[in-house]
Amino acid sequence: MIMTKMLRLEVISAQIVKPSSPTPQHLRRYNLSFLDQITPQVNNSMVYFFDAAAQKFDIIDISDRLKRSLSQVLTQYYPLAGRLMAKNLTVECNDEGVPYTEARVRCRLSHVIDDPSPADVGELLPFKMDEAVDTVLGVQFNVFECGGMAIGICISHKIADALSYFQFVKSWATVTRGGNPEHITTHFESSALFPPKHMPGYDPDCLVPKEKIVCNRFVFEASAVESLRSKYSEKVAKNILEGQKPPSRVEVLSTFIWTRFLEATKGEEEEEEGSKKKKIQLVAWAANLRPRMDPPLPEYAFGNYYWPMRTFPTLDEKGECHDMGRKLREELNKMDKGFIAKLRECEQWNPQQKKEEMVRSTGGGEEGEIAAFAFSSLCWFPVYEVDFGWGNPTWVGPPTWKFKNVVTFKDTKSSGGIEAYVSLTEEDMAKFEHDEQLLAHVSTAGLK
């Protein structure tokens, strides 16, 4: 029996689901790309919740259908049934299969999704977000006392970014409701497009912090997003008149959350020899490289096809930021065909050298200290386009994203709002979640 603050789970069974057909010998080794190399060994994870009213079959039949279709779709997504090998440079596509766990949750579905907590959502998954396992994919099928269901799915970020994750889940759902697995189109060419590089001394897992990270969900209703959008549009009216587009929803929420974080935690700046240490504020976003390739890659191209855009926004005397959106678009425009060609062609990667170059580019010199904050957006991703045969999910949510100073955006299911998943240290979260301006814009249902 597993117990959390809210949930009690009883594991009913644990099985291994193998591909319905063996992987051909020439596909038995899947090489990781350079972009896979620089990605920490964590798990992309989501839980899909379904109301009892949506069921057309009994629970046993539903689980059997899921296992049967998973077996079929693994033949097309053959690396997901394999195992990560030593040094995380390859996946041995040996058809060892996927862990599939069935669990009973001793509460009603509404008890979880009426006011969801990322920490409790994590208990409905087969692996923890930061759990390093050699298994590439894991599934947990959860059944609530009311008959509602939750399907928790983990895919190693080492071989798949968010879009790859959602494309796989969508394909699996299609096969479950009767689709032909042979009609699934896949693309496993990442290591050919971005060959692995020599990276002396670089450990991507060092990005996972040792301190305890708290993740809270904040809901911004459509009206609140538009209010902030209007505010920041006025601030950058001159730029708009010069031909720039008005700031997007994600840009204004990124600006708002970042400035509120700085305001809430500004008393933390360390003093050294009587003067404050200089901090260079770096804000990063993850950009999808697929449409920027030459030729562009399809959405179903599997792997890690993202690159961090790094900007150095500034604050005025009132603590307001007016240039984040502009700087973001400038960085995005730099990611053209020439940039990607250089990224593919360089033979060695030295992250420390790149960091020093960034610091010098800001005028901070080598003594500057970088204070990083990162954003990632799942808005417009096919999060809810998942129908296993009993309708789209009632709600979809991630577990705690255990990285410091990271925000992930996701569309609400309806009404045009945005859910922001904010991951901070316990100390910073205690200050941030009580910020008055933040609380004035978030829905009360979004606090946990």
Image: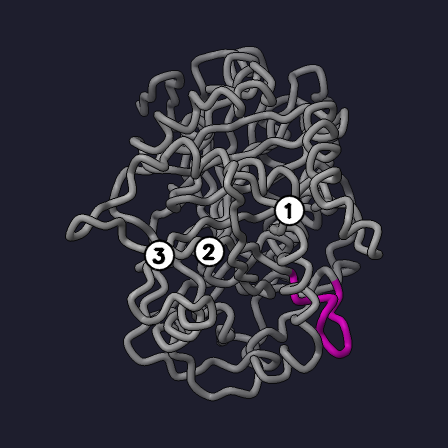
Q: Nearer the viewer, residue 340 or 10?
A: 340
Query: The residue under label 1 is which amino acid type?
Result: Val
Residue 383 on image: x %, y %: 67, 40
Residue 152 visible in image:
no
Identify the secondary structure beneath mark 3.
helix
Question: Over which residues does the magenta segment extend?
Answer: 288-298
Q: Nearer the viewer, residue 108 or 352?
A: 352
Residue 80 on image: x %, y %: 53, 59
**Which dot, 1 or 2, sits closer to the camera?**
2
Mark 3 is surrounded, within 10 Å at the Cα level, by few (under 14), some (14 to 19) or many (20 or more) other residues, namely few
**Which dot, 2 or 3, sits closer to the camera?**
2
Residue 197 on image: x %, y %: 44, 82
* Residue 348 in the image: above or below residue 22: below
Query: The residue under label 3 is which amino acid type?
Result: Leu
Q: Residue at x 56, y 62 (%)?
A: 309
Query: The residue under label 2 is which amino acid type?
Result: Leu
The first of marks 1 and 3 along the sequence is 1
> Which mark is on residue 406?
none
In terms of secondary structure, what is the magenta stretch mainly? Answer: loop
Q: Which residue is mark 1?
A: 169
Toward which corner of the image does residue 353 lie, by quadrant? bottom left
The first of marks 2 and 3 along the sequence is 3
